[in-house]
Image (cartoon, helix red, strand yellow):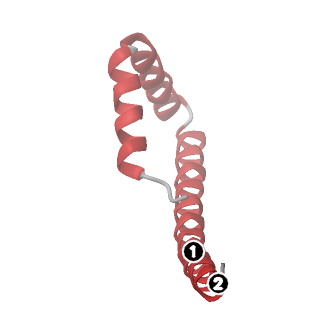
């Protein structure tokens, strides 16, 4: 199971477009954090970036393992007589 980033991005955009008040509130909170507490804002941005990059690496590693597992299963089913 690989992550489909384009589908995830589309879902987030659709959610924010359908819920304008929530999107405006989120933008307002982020702007207040940026203006009032820039260290906290940038710390949150850094944490989010690290989480996103870690999940990306994990998904790439697990997808290669899934492909290997599928090929091993296919080879094993070809060898078994029915």
The residue drawn where x is 60% and y is 51% is 47
Is residue 45 shown left or right of residue 12?
Answer: right
Q: CA distance from mark 1 to mark 2?
A: 10 Å
Check residue 58 in the rendering and tell me which mark sits there, or answer none: none
Q: Find residue 44 and report its horizontal and vertical position in percent.
A: 58, 44
The residue drawn where x is 50% and y is 23% is 29
Taking depth in this image into account, of 15 and 41 the one nearest to the observer is 15
Q: Splitting the image into 4 quarters, where does residue 62 fall?
A: bottom right
Q: Residue furthest bottom?
A: 79
Quadrant of the frame with the C terminus:
bottom right
Report which residue position mark 1 lands on.
70
Q: Find residue 52 and report its horizontal and vertical position in percent.
A: 53, 55
Q: Find residue 68 and report its horizontal and vertical position in percent.
A: 57, 80
Q: Residues within 10 Å of mark 1 (few under 14, many from 20)?
A: few
Secondary structure under badge 2?
helix
The residue drawn where x is 58% and y is 84% is 78
Quadrant of the frame with the N terminus:
bottom right
Secondary structure under badge 1?
helix
């Amino acid at each position: 199971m690989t992550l489909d980033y384009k589908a995830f991005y589309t879902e987030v955009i659709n959610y924010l477009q359908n819920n304008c008040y929530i999107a405006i509130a989120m933008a307002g909170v982020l702007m207040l954090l940026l203006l009032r507490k820039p260290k906290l804002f940038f710390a949150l941005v850094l944490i989010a970036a690290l989480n996103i990059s870690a999940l990306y690496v994990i998904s790439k590693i697990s997808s290669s393992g899934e492909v290997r597992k599928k090929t091993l299963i296919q080879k094993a089913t070809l060898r078994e007589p029915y």
